[in-house]
Image (tube, rainbow, N blue to C red):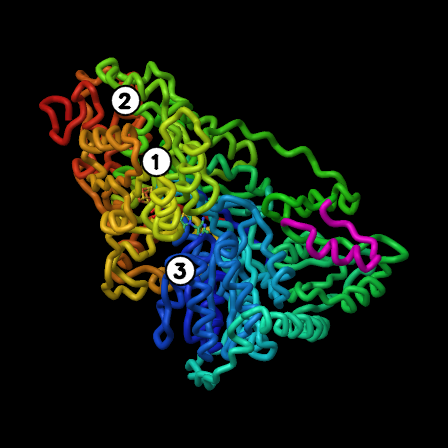
Amino acid sequence: MKKLLSGNEAIALGAYHAGVQVATAYPGTPSTEILETLASYEGLYVEWSTNEKVAMEVAAGAAFGGARAMVSMKMVGLNVAADPFMAAVYTGMRGALVVVSADDPGIHSSQNEQDNRHYAVMAKVPMLEPSDSQEAYELVDWAFRMSRQFDTPVLLRTTTRTSHGRSVVDFEPRERVPVALAPLTREPTKYVMIPAHARKRHEVIERRLVELAEFSESFPYNRMEPGDRKVGIVASGIGYQYAREVFPEASFLKLTMTHPFPKRLVQEFAREVGAHGRAPLLVVEELDPFLEERIRALGIPVVGKEAFPPTGEFNTDVVEAGARKLGLLPASPEPVPTPPLPARPPCLCPGCPHTAVFYLLRRLGFFHSPPTELPAERSALGNLQRVGLVIAGDIGCYTLSVLPPLLAMDTQGCMGASIGNAHGLSKAGIPNKVVAVLGDSTFVHSGIPSLIDVVYNRGSITTIVLDNGSTAMTGHQGHPGTGVTIRGETTHALDYAQLARAVGVPEVYEVDAFDVPTLESTLRHCVESNVPSLLIVKGPCPVHKRLTGEALVVDRETCDGCGSCIRLGCPALALEDGHARVESPLCIGAQCGLCEKVCPQDAISALVRDGHA
Amino acid sequence: MPKTDFIIAGVGGQGVILASDLLGDLAIATGRDVKKADVIGMAQRGGEVVSHVRWGDKVYSPLVQKGGAEYLLGLEKLESARWAPYLAPSGLAIVNNQSILPITVSSGGASYPPDEALVGTLRARTERVFVIEGQELARDCGAAAATNMVLMGYLARFLHLEQALWLDAIAQRVPKRFLEPDQRAFLAGWQEAEKAGAHP
Ligand SMILES: Cc1ncc(C[n+]2csc(CCOP(=O)(O)OP(=O)(O)O)c2C)c(N)n1
Ligand code: SF4
């Protein structure tokens, strides 16, 4: 049967058919749909874990117990999970463990562009790289079998385009074969890594690596595709597909198991296409020169990154430009110029519960903002305004507050870093007041240990948790604060205020995200106090809850076009010939009403005024 | 079977992905190879969305090349113009006559280009540009939320495939309660293309 599946759906289907018993993940683009798809099947255990480290530990534990387990995450998730990952490399497992790392060349929705193929080298584990959904489907089954055969975690590395791209998968619809758990035995020398045991296991790993290297030489998806012997191309993952478009006639070595690197196969290919005597081999791979360096180390002339860039995502045009640079294609005609068009950057949605916090932080004296922006009646805040605020941000929808018009974030690098960064900024002795802002899912993911650190080390920063009841950025998944599991069962909902009090935060407040005056006074109080504080800002994500409402209306007579509401950055508001206007299909109405609340002229309301409807 | 590349561009919430999924289903139903890539930025709402769909005997890249798209379906005018460089010189552009202001415009930082500039960008590449009143047609047939289906119906008229195949694909894809209005909107688009004499 043929179906158009994304790579992620294909991985889920492949895992299901391969008998996966336990699947874990923390959401992250472009990996999220793997677990979401698996959760639509019965007969296996699935969970959104608190973070990737926990996800890896749960999956590894299941594999210790003899199960076929899979854990999936975006590439930076593997940084978080690196410790238990390396531990599983040492112990091996009775069942099987497949680790899916979804990389994001082009940084569609990430904070960096790291190439996780290097993890396979460090961990000395086998790595498979699908180049379309059909391969993704088939390789999962291979990954489970290899994990059992070699007693090692197997890394399945995708990229945004292989994870999200859709292509035809031809598969046998079949019943899932129930797999019995491998019997449990006590083997402390294998599963308890005291130094004496770990030294022995390291030797096992090295022997395993030699066996895997042999396996890779004859892995059926590492294959030569003979063609014109004048051009020999080595490619893997999605790069292979673009290279195939640009060089339809060339000879190809398509590598799918890229670690351990199949040296003899590459040497044989180089001999086939005469790479030593004639033109060098071309390597088409996204991001780092991973294959290129290994081929060069074999003494084979090779061209890669000098033609095909180490940054950004590839496409056929990029590969074609590289071929032109190398003189393999004629120079291109001049592209037809297009007039500059206004960008359409992402922004917080209408009715977003994050908006008011950042609007107020900026108004409170964010250090980039010109002091004139503060209304005169707030001169009581003069002191604070002069000192200003530094806002250590974090990752989620709310990171968009860095863009105009909110302009209210100063740092953001990786998930959960806001609190630690803020504490460090403050301990460095900068003159500004420091605030950490992070989402609820991010707080639970990796913010809590830092909050404990602040209290323990007598810090003084303000922490704001944006509790929108959702992991919104990645598509509204549940997390331990939401009280619902991935399968929709009710469970305990973490109480952030109680938690903060338990770890010793002296000042803890919970405020409604749309109660502007209380939010502002509480914020000011927290920032001015010299003890650690936690402010929990509560408001549902309207997209998650599918909230709609009667649009607000601007009275054009009263509106003097001051732009106070526009500075909220709400996409439902526009400034048009000197007056604000509400784009009615987008506005969710009075349940948000932020523009009404910040308008100094009282020109916006839910009521349709006589004559001005 | 010749290669056929499509670009469908619009704004979050306009139904770009559903429209391109239908093209994927139709390819499978007619024995073609197909690949598709959706590019959705960080925005939940309001950001740009584009789908690349490629039909052929054997398709490698899921992404369309610049100048390679035989068909450009634009659900919003600014986004249609943004993808103009992807249109093949002899290609066909179908543009929904709707403007959705990006935040850069609504916050007063930039202005929304006039129609002449947007549609002109497409006309500079091909004579075959059709601007249609998608929202109005959708509303008139009682399916206000199905502008994407009107556009798909219009496009489908050019693709030499039986109407029944399309209606079937829609039935497979959309939830029951939307099926009837969605199919009606599709047919409205199909008829509009015929009325305009805009068929091959
Ligand atoms: C280590 C790591 N894992 C996952 C992600 C993907 N990711 C980006 S933001 C985010 C969570 C957002 O949730 P929350 O903090 O609640 O903010 P919201 O988007 O709901 O505003 C996730 C999981 C990431 N960037 N880094
Ligand atoms: S999806 Fe929800 S949390 Fe994210 S920007 Fe939109 S309203 Fe805000």
Dot label at residue B166: 3
Q: CA distance from mark 1 to mark 3?
A: 59 Å
Q: Position of residue A115 (x, y in %)?
A: 60, 52
Q: Residue at x 39, y 32 (%)?
A: A391
* Percent coordinates x, y for residue A366 in the rendering: 36, 25
Q: Nearer the viewer, mark 1 or mark 3?
A: 1
Could you tell me how far apart the alpha carbons at marks 1 and 2 are, in whole angstroms?
A: 29 Å
> Is residue A125 one of those drawn in magenta?
no
* Nearer the observer, B179 or A296: A296
Q: Which residues are magenta?
A: A287-305
The C terminus of chain A, quarter of image: top left
Residue ID at (72%, 74%): A214
**Dot placed on the residue nearer the N-terminal end, 1 or 2:** 1
Tell me the crowding category of disc 3: few under 14, some 14 to 19, or many 20 or more residues within 10 angstroms, Cα based. Answer: many
Element under disc 1 = loop
Residue appearing at x 23%, y 15% in the figure: A560
Question: In what element is the residue under mark 2?
Answer: loop
Q: Which kind of residue does numbered mark 2 sit on?
A: Ser
- Residue A313 in the figure: left or right of residue A77: right
Going by the numbered disc 3, the residue's amino acid type is Trp
Question: Is residue A469 visible to the viewer in this orientation of the structure?
Answer: yes
Q: Amino acid at mark 1?
A: Ile
Q: Are marks 1 and 2 on the same chain?
A: yes
Q: Position of residue A220 (x, y in %)?
A: 67, 73
The image quadrant where one finds ligand 2 is top left
The numbered disc on residue A461 is 1
Measure how far apart labels 3 and 2 are at the Cα level: 49 Å
